[in-house]
Amino acid sequence: MTIPDIGYPRLCLVVDDSTTVRRIAGGMFRDLGYIVAESASGRQALEMCREVTPDVILLDWNMPVMDGITCLVTLRAMDLAPQPKVILCTTENTLEKIGIAMTAGADEYIMKPFDREILRDKLIQLGLEAVEEEAA
């Protein structure tokens, strides 16, 4: 799968080995006005980022094939301009784990489970304006 390159300024890549988490988080981003691409592994996410750099990545920590921290460190070493904002998403909640994530290059940290308002607030903190779709 490739990330759609349509010139839209708000592109999100949701990276999680859980189809359910990708579907739910992707829906939240769509509600906030984002185009969404999905990846089931860190390795696949890096391949996708080589094609098109997303504006923001929601990255799970605990995944098979390549975990989120390894993916994040590799992503930060890539020659991408600009680098995407990365929100590390996990059940890991100790200060030590949060420190590891931030040292590895995460821009923000979000705990599972989360809702659309928490996600929206994180995006605003990152300077990524969320444009919520009007209810039909």
Image (cartoon, helix red, strand yellow):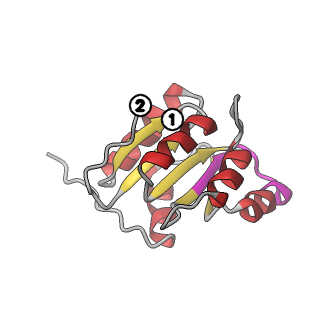
Instruction: Name which residue lies at 61% across and 65% down.
Output: 107
> How far, Cα to Cα, is label 1 from label 2?
8 Å
User: Label 1 neighbourhood size at 10 Å, few (<14), some (14-19), many (20+)?
Assistant: many
- Report x, y in % for residue 53: 45, 54
> Horizontally, is 67 left or right of 75 in the view?
right
Instruction: Name which residue lies at 57% across and 61% down.
Output: 79
Residue 132 lies, with reference to residue 44, above or below; the image says below
- Which residue was labeled with disc 2? 1
Q: Which residues are magenta?
A: 87-97
Mark 1 or mark 2, which has the lower sequence index? 2
- Which residue was labeled with disc 1? 39
On-image quarter of the C terminus:
top left
Residue 89 part of the magenta-drawn span: yes
Q: Does the residue at mark 1 contact the one at mark 2 (Cβ under 8 Å)?
A: yes
Residue 52 part of the magenta-drawn span: no
* Residue 106, quarter of picture: bottom right
> Horizontally, is 97 left or right of 52 in the view?
right
- Report x, y in % for residue 92: 76, 46
- Residue 121 versus residue 33: which sits nearer the camera? 33
Instruction: Name which residue lies at 45% across and 73% down.
Output: 127
Disc 1 residue type?
A: Ser
Helix, strand or loop status at disc 2: loop
Extreme-right residue of the structure = 96
- Report x, y in % for residue 101: 74, 57
